Each structure stands twice: as C-alpha cells, then as structure tokens.
Amino acid sequence: MKKLAIYPYNIRFTWLCRSIVEGWNLEYEDVQLFAPVSHGLEGKDASALDGGVPIKRVVHSLINVINSNDIDEIIIDYDERIPLQDYIKIVKVFCSYIQVCFTKAMFFKYKDLLPENGKVLLNSEYAAINTADKCQLMEMPVPVIFVLGIDDWCGKNLLALQLREKFSRETYRAVVVSNMSFGETCGCVRFPNVLFDNIDPSKKIVSLNQWMYNLANKEKPDVVIIDIPGGIMKLNPYNFSEWGEYAYLIAMSIRADLGLLCLPANYLTTEYLAHLESICLYKYNISLLAFGMSNVDLSLDHDTRELIHITLPYSHTKKFIDDYRKAVDNPKIIFSISDKREVNELTQKMIKTMEQDFR
C-alpha cells in the first residue's frame, strides 16, 4: 500500500483522510497533509475543517512539503488563493520522483504547464454499456443499500465508506458506487457518464440498470452500497438547482432493499421525519430503515439567496438526537454518522435484516 500526500489540504479531503487513518481505504496506508501558512491550518489536526472527531494527522506548511520524501503519491488540487509559482515549484519537485495526481480543476486550470508523467483523476474504468435498444430491467443478484441525503453535504460519503468497512469486518464484501471526489482512491466505483448525459430519461434508466447488473456480476460482492448523488428535494426557494432527479433515475433503474437518509444537524420532530419518509417512499419507492445525522447544519442566507453549510461540534448533534429520543415514545431509528458505535449497531441490524430477506 502507498503513502499519500495532499496539497493544499481543504475540507474536500477530510473524508479521504479519515478513510486512510481509520483503515477503510484500499489504496493507501498513510497520509500527509500540507497547506500554505496563509491558510491558517499549520499545526492543526485535519479535523479542524469539519468539526468531527480528531483525525490525528497534523497539517504541515509548504516548506515541509519540499523537504518530505516519505511519499509515494501526491494529489495536487487547485486553489485560487495559491500563486501559480508555488504550484510550479511543487509540481517540479514531486514529478521528479513520485506519482502525481492532478484534480480536474488543477488540470484544466494549468494543463499547459503540467508534465507528462502526472495523471488526472478521471472516471472509473467502468463505462456505461450501450443498452438503449434493450427494455428489460434486470433484478440485482445481491442486496442493494441506498444512502441518500437531504443534500450532498449531509455525510453520505462518510457513511457509505463506514458501512463498507463494517460489512468487511463481518466478512461481507461490499462495493460502493459513488461520485464522491477522489472516490477511486478509496476503491469506490464511479457512476457511468450516462447518468449525467442529456438523453431520454427512459434510456438512462435502462442503461443504469444494465450497468449495475453487470457490475454486480463482475465484482461479485455480497452487497452493493449506492451513495446517491445530490439531494432528494429542492431546498433553496430562490435558486433552483435540483429536485432529486439523480435519486429518481437510480431508484427507477434498480430496487433498493434498504434505505438510509442523511440529515443536517437540527432539531427533530415526528412530523419532520414522517414527511421525509413519505418523500422517499412515494417519490423514490425506498423504505427507510434509519436516519443518520451529520455534523453539518443548513441555513438559508436571504441576502445572498444561497444555502450555507455550518459545521457544528459533535456535542450538538448528540443533543439533537438525545432530545428527540426522550420526547417521543416510539422514536424512529436515529444515529450519528460520526459515532462509530452507533454505525456499527446499525450495520448489525442491516445484516440481520438482509439475512432474513435473502435466506
């Protein structure tokens, strides 16, 4: 296994760091994090950006990058705050002796300056199969778990990776299908381009079904975990971005045996959860087993008309969950995505449910 470095470290990489440090990652055994001094992260734990439990990896300065040689591979991301000459210096130093991975943003911004021996993180080797002329939808040969979210920032990526690791500890092999950033570095499979192409929705559904079916037959997992892109509903009344179309297309292409919905950190009521259950059941034909609460809260800025994501301490999340459990006689299954014990208990429940359904 390889040792990874990331420059510049930002919140997009927190889930990747956790996956490596906690042993979920199939590619890397350790990670080093670097950012310019001006970013204010030097000497801080990597968890400072998402407010989660400590990752136990300290962010170093740019100077330490140049002096570091205990690295097999480095991911270089684009950040408009970093001068071009700093990027050039980093690329020249590392391209001489290790594998360099450029993010798409970095590649398209400075593609004329990048050396030939660096690679760009693009889609997985799995390509969409052209099945537009076929109309039969195939039943998946293995159980399928959908991980949905109110939006993309509600901890779906982290939960999907944790579930895979928990299933692995129980000797079940799980494949995660996800379009999370750098998902390939964690052994995830990216969705085929057909999901995002501008073609007839019915053709998308058939193609997705065939692709998922072939993936299951090729990889032969015990369970497939699908991290659904985007959210399940419109959240911003001022700015229309999506209505859950990806969730709808995927749900129409294959049937989910179990569903989990990730929520922002906020107060919970019986009516609120019942409303979300109805959306998932009647809009996507997904029966929810449990709700997972993240450390991220959502609020709407009426001046800018944009959604704001605010990271809260774990203690706030725990209080929201505890208050709900005390106030309701027969509460729904609610767990904290960042609580390993609760995720492990949920996994055990899922395994028992699937063993009963597929025996």
Image (tube, rainbow, N blue to C red):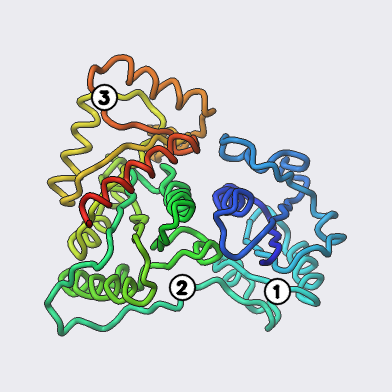
Q: Which mark is residue 99?
A: 1
Q: Residue at x 40, y 48 (%)?
A: 152
Q: Is residue 340 left or right of residue 334?
A: right
- Nearest to the eye among marks 3 and 1: give it: 3
Q: Residues within 10 Å of mark 3 (few under 14, many from 20)?
A: few
Tag 1 secondary structure = strand
Tag 2 secondary structure = loop
| Cα–Cα gap, marks 2 and 3 | 41 Å
Q: Residue at x 18, y 72 (%)?
A: 138
Q: Residues within 10 Å of mark 1 (few under 14, many from 20)?
A: some
Instruction: Check the image and report above or below for 180 versus 311.
Output: below
Instruction: Check the image and report above or below for 208 versus 174.
Output: below
Looking at numbered disc 2 in the image, what kind of residue is underneath it?
A: Asn
Where does residue 88 sit, x and y in percent of width and height?
A: 76, 69
Looking at numbered disc 1 in the image, what kind of residue is underneath it?
A: Gln
Where does residue 126 sit, x and y in percent of width and height?
A: 40, 77
Q: On the rendered image, what quadrant is the N terminus found in?
A: bottom right
Nearest to N terminus: mark 2 or mark 3: 2
* Residue for badge 2: 123
Q: Which mark is residue 331?
A: 3
Q: Nearer the viewer, residue 91 or 301?
A: 91
Q: Nearer the viewer, residue 120 or 80?
A: 120
Q: Nearer the viewer, residue 353 or 28?
A: 353
Nearest to N terminus: mark 2 or mark 1: 1
Q: Residue furthest front?
A: 359
Nearest to N terminus: mark 3 or mark 1: 1
